[in-house]
Image (cartoon, rainbow, N blue to C red):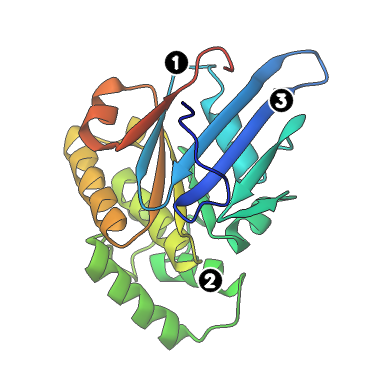
């Protein structure tokens, strides 16, 4: 029996079929990987360093072109040329190294992200951001300068930025690697709140205890398979 639903099944958020990535120097990062994520679930991608986890997700996010394979998102076959294409289809990725403007405030960073996608007034964005913070528990002082915030709060800003830009599927790349145990527990509470809102979350990790704590399902990668 197949573990995979049809890519056009309404329950499916993402279906990646036969994904391979071979670099020009002959290094094989991924070999015929099938990967499926259901809407509204927390799905862990587990494996040791170098297993291909982040490469697979960077392909989904439009940063890397696969050598072969097909990708379906929300029931449609897609071919993203850039992360901007992915975000236009509701997919965002938060890396270990954040992409915030350090000397901008929290609000300025988020306003910049939103207005890169569509026109919006400052008052509208501020109001939506306040509502989102309340709903998710991801609370940060909007007028704080990002470089003055601890790492855990900067990560919250990255997640809020992605959600405000329209993400319905959030890829978190080893998100606990920069967090204290207390911040990790708080992050998991935020993930539960996002799931309750219908946001789909993919968690890249090599920590089995995190999978047990938060994931609904898990895909294990080993040496690109």
Residue 69: give x, y in percent of width and height: 71, 33
Q: Which residue is mark 1?
A: 48
Asked whether 175 or 205 is in front, the reply is: 205
Residue 189: give x, y in percent of width and height: 20, 49
Residue 75: give x, y in percent of width and height: 58, 55
Q: Are marks 2 and 3 in contact (CB under 8 Å)?
A: no
Q: Which residue is mark 3?
A: 21
In terms of sequence position, does the residue under pointer 2 or pointer 1 come before the other? Answer: 1
Q: Nearer the viewer, mark 2 or mark 3?
A: 3
Local crowd at mark 2 within 10 Å, few (<14), some, or many (≥20)? many
Residue 147, can we see it?
no
The label shown at residue 173 is none
Asked whether 153 or 132 is in front, the reply is: 132
| Most distant residue in the front direction | 1
Q: Nearer the viewer, mark 3 or mark 1?
A: 3
Local crowd at mark 1 within 10 Å, few (<14), some, or many (≥20)? some
- Per the model, the C-alpha gap separating discs 3 and 1 is 18 Å
On screen, residue 59 versus residue 66, left or right, reads: left
Q: Which residue is mark 2?
A: 114
Residue located at (53% from left, 83% from top):
120
Q: Nearer the viewer, mark 2 or mark 1?
A: 1
Q: Is residue 148 above or below residue 214?
A: below
């Amino acid at each position: 029996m197949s573990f995979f639903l049809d890519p056009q099944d309404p329950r499916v958020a993402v279906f990646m079929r036969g994904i391979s990535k071979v670099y020009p120097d002959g290094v094989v990062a991924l070999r015929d990987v099938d990967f499926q994520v259901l809407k509204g679930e927390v799905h862990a991608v587990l494996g040791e360093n170098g297993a291909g986890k982040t490469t697979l997700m960077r392909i989904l996010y439009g940063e890397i072109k696969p050598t072969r394979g097909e990708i379906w998102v929300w029931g449609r076959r897609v071919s993203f040329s850039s992360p901007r294409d992915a975000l236009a289809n509701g997919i965002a990725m938060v890396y270990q190294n954040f992409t915030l403007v350090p000397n901008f405030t929290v609000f300025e960073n988020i306003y910049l992200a939103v207005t890169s996608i569509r026109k919006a007034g400052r008052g509208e964005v501020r109001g939506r951001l306040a509502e989102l913070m309340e709903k998710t528990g991801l609370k940060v002082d909007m007028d704080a300068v990002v470089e003055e915030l601890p790492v855990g709060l900067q990560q919250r800003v990255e997640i809020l930025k992605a959600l405000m830009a329209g993400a319905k599927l959030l890829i978190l790349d080893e998100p606990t690697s920069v967090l204290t145990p207390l911040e990790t527990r708080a992050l998991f509470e935020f993930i539960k709140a996002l799931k309750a809102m219908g946001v789909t979350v993919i968690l890249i990790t090599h920590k089995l205890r995190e999978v047990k704590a938060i994931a609904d399902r898990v895909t294990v990668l080993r040496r690109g398979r």
